[in-house]
Image (tube, rainbow, N blue to C red):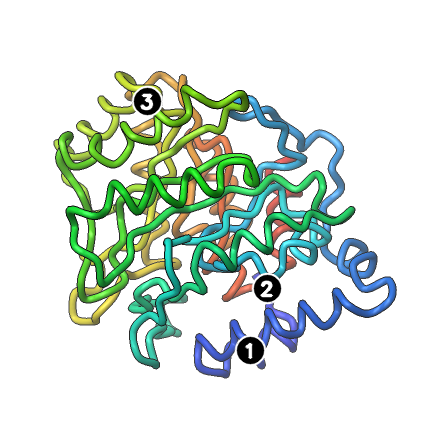
Amino acid sequence: MRRSLFQYILCGLPAEMAQTVRMTLLGAVGKIPFGKWLLKRCYAPKEEGLGREVFGIHFRNPIGIGSGFDANGDRLGELSALGFGFVEIGSVVPRPQPGTPRPRLRRLRKEHSYVDNSGYPSRGMEYVLHNVRKRTPHTANLVIGCNIGKLTASHVDNSPKEYLRVFRNMYQYVDFFVINIACNTAAKRFVPRTREEIQSLIEPLFEFRRGQLDYRPILLKISPDLTKEELDTVIDILIETPLDGIEAVAGSLDLMPEFKGAATGALLTKRAIEIVRYIAERTEHNYPIIGSGGAMTPDDIASMMEAGASLVALNSGIRENGFKLLRKGAERVKK
């Protein structure tokens, strides 16, 4: 994709600074009179023929923002005005955590990729709750997903309680949940791989949901570094439990082992599409899949959906190519 002049400038900045500038300017535009109308005019795709029902929720289009882009839900109104089909906030954790020391996001220019060693910086659940509670006319119909992660400093044994605490408190304010079992962007990583480890996290969530009047879908976000046997275990859990789907995939520790952190971006594209296709074929396309990781171009988005993804979540693709990727991707999907 051809970049705009503004995008060229952003790509000349350190990666984390570029994202801060992008989100600050996005917020500034959203506050000026007719700012959100201008964002919609410039970037939002035409919605005819793009809407779809996925796990019982209507999405105006299948292309959304993945976790880590607006982690604390600060720009929900602006991202809605841009026309995204959904926004996945998070990873949300029970308490604020600063993440790892900067610099913690490395841009690999030749590879059009990033290495994320951020450790999931977050302002914490209470801050995020404040943002998602105050729905405005611009976010009233926005589909919001909540990605739940683990506090980096806490002991592994506390993880089920941490996930349940966020799940219970956010339940009434978001539309679906993504349980992150690939928390791999910090030195103290958390990537449960066995049936027992995974079910210890999700069973308390199922139990809480059974007692609620409203139904919130629950998905697992998985690592691209799982072996075939480990991936089969996740798929078996999907089939045999009340899970609603899978998000594939998070960043990879194996692709760039010489760097600290998880690789995302174009380096991940092929592997992410392969995993989406494998899950879709093994489940006979009976379960929703959110394709994430490596969707950098309109063709990547289309390939994800052709492989079996119901929805596609963007992150590195927007950082690399700007918000116009949404409209271009939607046009490609409609062909």
Quadrant of the drawing holding the N terminus: bottom right
Image marks 2 and 1: residues in contact by CB distance under 8 Å: yes
- Which residue is denoted by mark 1 in the rendering? 10
In the rendered structure, which amino acid carries the disc numbered 1?
Leu
User: Mark 3 packing: few (<14 Cα in 10 Å), some, or many (20+)?
Assistant: few
Residue 271 shows in the view: no
| Residue shown at 26% from the left, 48% from the top | 182
Circle number at residue 152: none
Q: In the figure, 243 relative to 264: above or below?
A: above
Q: Position of residue 332 (x, y in %)?
A: 61, 42
- Mark positioned earlier in the residue sequence (2 or 1): 1
Residue at numbered disc 3: 281
Find residue 304 and report its horizontal and vertical position in percent. 44, 39
- Name the image quarter holding residue 233: top left
Q: Secondary structure at mark 3?
A: helix
Going from the N terminus, do you reach mark 2 or mark 3 first?
Answer: 3
Q: Earlier in the sequence, mark 1 or mark 3?
A: 1
